[in-house]
Structure formats: structure tokens, C-alpha cells
Amino acid sequence: MSKIFEYAVVHVPDAKEVKDGKKPEIIVKPTVILAKDDREALFNVTRAIPAEYADRFDQLEIAIRPF
């Protein structure tokens, strides 16, 4: 049985980017999905991350919660 999950992804700039004035930004707006468990939900979240952030996973915060 599927469950409802909500998620969002935030890019957190590194120290150099902060020094240049860059601030954290939401790169995947809050989204609601159906998934059988949290692992499947997380898998779907990682697929929603834009390609330009693929090499910066250490700078991403994924917020995910079940309903």
C-alpha cells in the first residue's frame, strides 16, 4: 500500500559561495508523492534533483516527511 510523502530540496552554498553573497535556495519546491516506503520516496526525490546539482550532493539538504 502506498503512503503520502512530502519533500523539498535545498542547496546550501559552501564557504566560498557564502563569501560571494550566495544564500541557500530551494531547488526542488515542496512536492507531494505516493511511495510504498521512505526508501522509495527518497529514490524519487533524488531523481527530481536538477542535473546541474548532481556533482554537489554534499551541499544539498533533503527534507522528506510522511503523512
Image (tube, helix red, strand yellow):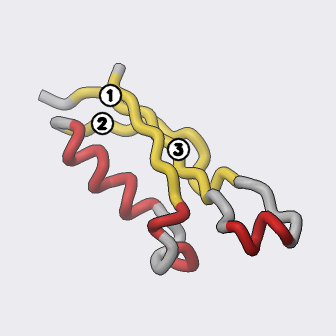
Image quarter for residue 15?
bottom right
Split into 4 quadrants, where in the image is the N terminus? Answer: top left
Please state which amino acid type lies under the numbered disc 2: Leu
Residue pushed farthest top? 67
Report which residue position mark 3 lands on.
8
Quarter of the image where one finds residue 5: top left
**Type of the residue with mark 3:** Ala
User: Is 35 positioned to the left or the right of 33 in the image?
Assistant: left
Residue 48 lies, in percent from the top left, at 45, 60
**Tag 1: Cα neighbours inside 10 Å, few (<14), some, or many (≥20)?**
some
Residue 58 versus residue 31 in the image, above or below: below
Asked if marks 1 and 2 touch (Cβ < 8 Å), the reply is yes
The span from disc 1 to disc 3 (Cα, nearest Å) is 14 Å
Residue at 27 percent across and 55 percent down: it is: 43
The x and y percentages for residue 65 are 39, 29
Q: Is residue 53 above or below residue 4?
A: below
Q: Secondary structure at mark 3?
A: strand
**Residue indicated by mark 1:** 4
Q: Residues within 10 Å of mark 2 (few under 14, many from 20)?
A: some
Q: Nearer the viewer, residue 29 or 10?
A: 10
Question: In the figure, is residue 26 to the left or right of 63?
Answer: right
| Rendered residue at 18%/36% (across/down) | 37
N-term mark: 1 or 2: 1
- Measure the alpha-carbon separation of dots 2 and 3: 14 Å
Q: Nearer the viewer, residue 26 or 56?
A: 56
Marks 1 and 2 sit apart, C-alpha to C-alpha, by: 5 Å
Residue to which mark 2 is pinned: 34
Q: How many marks?
A: 3
Q: Residues within 10 Å of mark 3 (few under 14, many from 20)?
A: some
* Quadrant of the snapshot with the C terminus: top left
